[in-house]
């Protein structure tokens, strides 16, 4: 059997992802989230784990550096990676929304500036509404942008709503339901068919 390379995301879904893998007896003995190590193997070395930034998981899979990835739908859509999306793992559930100052409505007349970690997804959403918006790409603390005049609105992920609330912002439009998905490299799906199918089926069983 060939080794399967699996890329998983650091950050808020890492613990749930690892619990899911452990539940189907896929263990990485020396893995822990604070480790500075980035590559881990299961005991029989049939699976190699890459522990990477969430936003990069689709790229690793598209380029074939990983055969399988566990990635947020937000990052899959933003990357526009050409991969197979096989399963919804039902973890990391949240929503991609447009938000602004509380009580505000989306101003459709003026030329809007939207701050986001997801400029592609943002542009796509507004172009479906027939609106051409300017985007400001930020890598975090996006909620700050409308408060200091850097943008009119933000396009971001909301999970509990706490960050919006604590910064005096509220949801203006819900755009998309987001959750963690299992994605597969297209070539690996053909050339390592037995190995990838085995891992996918195990994970599917655990999810069900
Ligand atoms: C994400 C997102 C929001 C926040 C939403 O940021 O960009 O800022 O979580 O979560 P909530 O609705 O539960 O408050 P993250 O925590 O990844 O930090 P970041 O600002 O550094 O990107």
Image: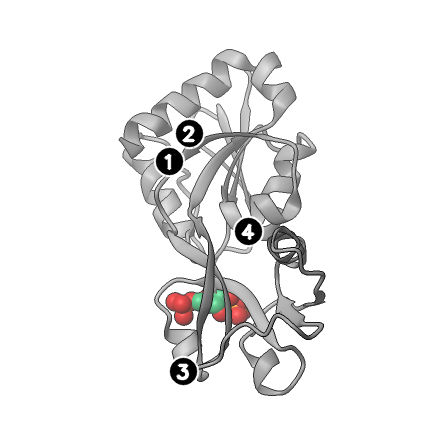
Which residue position is annotated with label 1? 27
User: Is residue 88 placed above or below 202 in the rendered structure?
Assistant: below
Mark sitting earlier along the chain (2/1): 1
Does the residue at mark 2 contact the one at mark 1 (Cβ under 8 Å)? yes
N-terminal-most mark, 2 or 4: 2
Seen at 60% across and 32% down, the residue is: 66
Image coordinates for residue 81, horizontal then vertical, percent: 65, 38
Estimate how packed mark 1 is, as few (under 14), some (14 to 19) or many (20 or more) residues with alpha carbons within 10 Å.
some
In this rendering, which labeled residue sits more in front, label 2 or label 4?
Answer: 4
**Quarter of the figure with the C terminus:** top left
User: Which residue, given by chain and number where applicable, does mark 4 sit on?
Assistant: 54
> CB of mark 1 within 8 Å of CB of mark 3?
no
Q: CA distance from mark 1 to mark 3?
A: 38 Å
Is the CB of mark 1 within 8 Å of ligand 1?
no
Mark 1 secondary-structure assignment:
loop
In the picture, residue 118 is in which quadrant? bottom right
Q: Position of residue 132 (x, y in %)?
A: 72, 61
Distance between the Cα atoms at labels 3 and 2? 45 Å
In the image, is residue 87 above or below residue 138?
above
Q: Earlier in the sequence, mark 1 or mark 4?
A: 1
Residue, disc 3: 166
Q: CA distance from mark 4 to mark 3?
A: 25 Å
Residue 181, picture quadrant: top left
Name the residue tied to disc 2: 43
Front residue of 171/69: it is 171
Work out how far the residue at label 2 is from the one at label 4, CA to CA, in angstroms: 25 Å
Q: What is the x, y in percent for residue 8? A: 50, 43
Does residue 68 appear anywhere in the picture? yes
**Disc 1 from disc 4: Cα separation:** 20 Å
């Amino acid at each position: 059997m060939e080794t399967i390379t699996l890329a998983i995301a650091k950050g808020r879904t890492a613990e749930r992802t690892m619990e899911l893998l452990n539940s189907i007896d896929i263990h990485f003995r020396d893995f822990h989230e604070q480790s500075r190590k980035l590559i881990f193997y299961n005991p029989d070395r049939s699976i190699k784990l890459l522990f990477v930034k969430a936003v990069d998981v689709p790229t690793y899979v598209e380029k074939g550096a990983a055969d399988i990835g566990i990635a947020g739908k937000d990052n899959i859509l933003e990357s526009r990676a050409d991969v197979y999306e096989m399963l919804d793992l039902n973890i990391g559930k949240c929503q991609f929304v447009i938000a602004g100052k509380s009580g505000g409505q989306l101003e459709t007349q003026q030329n809007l500036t939207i701050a986001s970690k997801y400029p592609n997804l943002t542009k796509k959403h507004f172009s479906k509404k027939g609106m051409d918006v300017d985007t400001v790409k930020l890598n975090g603390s996006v909620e700050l942008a409308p408060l200091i005049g850097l943008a009119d609105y933000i396009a971001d992920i909301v999970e509990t709503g706490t960050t919006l609330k604590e910064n005096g912002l509220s949801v203006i439009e819900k755009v998309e339901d987001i959750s963690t998905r299992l994605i597969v490299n297209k070539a690996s799906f053909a050339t390592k068919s037995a190995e990838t199918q085995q891992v996918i089926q195990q994970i599917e069983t655990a999810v069900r």
